[in-house]
Image: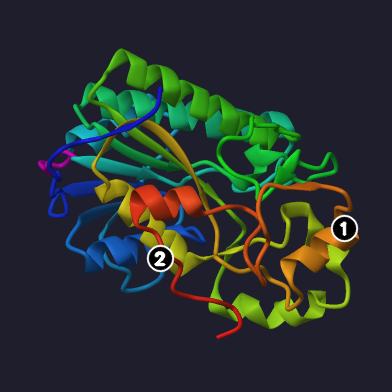
Amino acid sequence: MPSRVLPQPRSATTGRVVVTGAAGRLGVAVVEDLTDHGWDVVAVDQTPPPARAPGRFVTADLTDYGQVAELMSGFDESAPATAVVHLAAVPAPGLRPDAATFANNVPATYNVFRAARAAGVRNVVWASSETVLGLPFAVPPVSVPVDEEMPVQPWSTYALGKVCEEELARHLVRWDPELKMVALRFSNVMHPQDYLEFDTWQDDASARRWNMWSYIDARDGAQATRRALEADLVGFEAFIIANSDTCMRRDSADLLDEQFPGIERTRAIRGRESLLSIDKARRLLGYEPRHSWTT
């Protein structure tokens, strides 16, 4: 079900938001950004965030529905949540056996979705993944830039779990027409210190072929998360969230010629632009990356 724009803004930036996976590569930046923009953050993880991180930190097991329900409805005499950002997960394929990855990620997400709805939380943003687009692109996409209109094509159990989560959301918004559920298909999350490695990839375009040389600066990932949280939408939407450039110094069209010869181009490819399109996020969220590995 496509989302629709509400006529008036919700102005929810003073609400309480539960952020799961708050100590992760993206979560730390998200908690900091939301706090800086007026949100009251409950930071949830199984490991502590960095010292002096903002927000109220809580340890919880998201595969236990009772614990998740308390996070949403309020605990220890605290106020209930008005929104949730769900980032917690086994973060990539191959880190655990497939069954363990699925058994953690999908039930935890179901619990977050179900508990949020039971508590009346209708503003849900969560981390989907670029992997649903067909990564590692052993089977090339039908065309580039890759965008949200292309059918999902999971090639790992991790990606399959993310597809299941998106399908859950599609049906939940059908059940509740006022529910807003936004899936952010994040690219490979990078911190500034990670940029030191980028130069080692320049002589071998195949090294990062697997996601079409895409990445997302954690600070821009946090920006996109906040914009999705504050967007005046209802229904389900999915957005690709990447930086506007690639991790390579070569033009993107040259990279395509070498690594994906013959692939259809639906428009001209300019300079070093990302081949995972962020046009939809720009249009509906007002998202614009502010950080690049080259600056």
Residue 104, given in percent of the width and then of the height, sits at 56, 33
Assign a secondary structure to mark 1.
helix
Residue 146, given in percent of the width and then of the height, sits at 65, 46
Assign a secondary structure to mark 2.
helix
Residue 63, given in percent of the width and then of the height, sits at 46, 30
Depth check: 117 or 108 in front?
A: 117
**Does residue 111 appear left or right of residue 190 in this picture?**
left
Residue 59, given in percent of the width and then of the height, sits at 36, 48
Q: Is residue 58 visible?
A: no
Which mark is first along the chain, 2 or 1? 2
Q: Neighbour class for label 2 at 10 Å: few (<14), some, many (≥20)?
A: many
Residue at the spot 20% in from the left edge and 27% down from the top edge: 119
Depth check: 18 or 210 in front?
A: 210
Query: Which residue of the protein is positioned furthest toward the bottom in this rendering?
Result: 295
**Does residue 218 appear left or right of residue 55 in this picture?**
right
How many numbered discs sit on the rendered protein? Answer: 2
Figure colour scheme = rainbow
Which stretch is magenta? 75-81
Residue at the spot 27% in from the left edge and 18% down from the top edge: 176
Q: Is residue 90 above or below residue 73?
A: below
Identify the residue position indicated by label 2 in the image.
29
The numbered disc on residue 273 is none
Q: Is the stretch drawn in magenta largely helix, strand or loop?
A: loop
Q: Neighbour class for label 1 at 10 Å: few (<14), some, many (≥20)?
A: some
Mark 1 → mark 2, Cα distance in angstroms: 33 Å
Residue at the spot 69% in from the left edge and 28% down from the top edge: 99
Identify the residue position indicated by label 1 in the image.
259
Q: Please tell me whether mark 1 or mark 2 is closer to you in this view.
A: 1
Amino acid at the residue labelled 1: Gln
Amino acid at the residue labelled 2: Ala
> In the picture, residue 138 is in which quadrant?
top right
Q: Is residue 54 magenta?
A: no
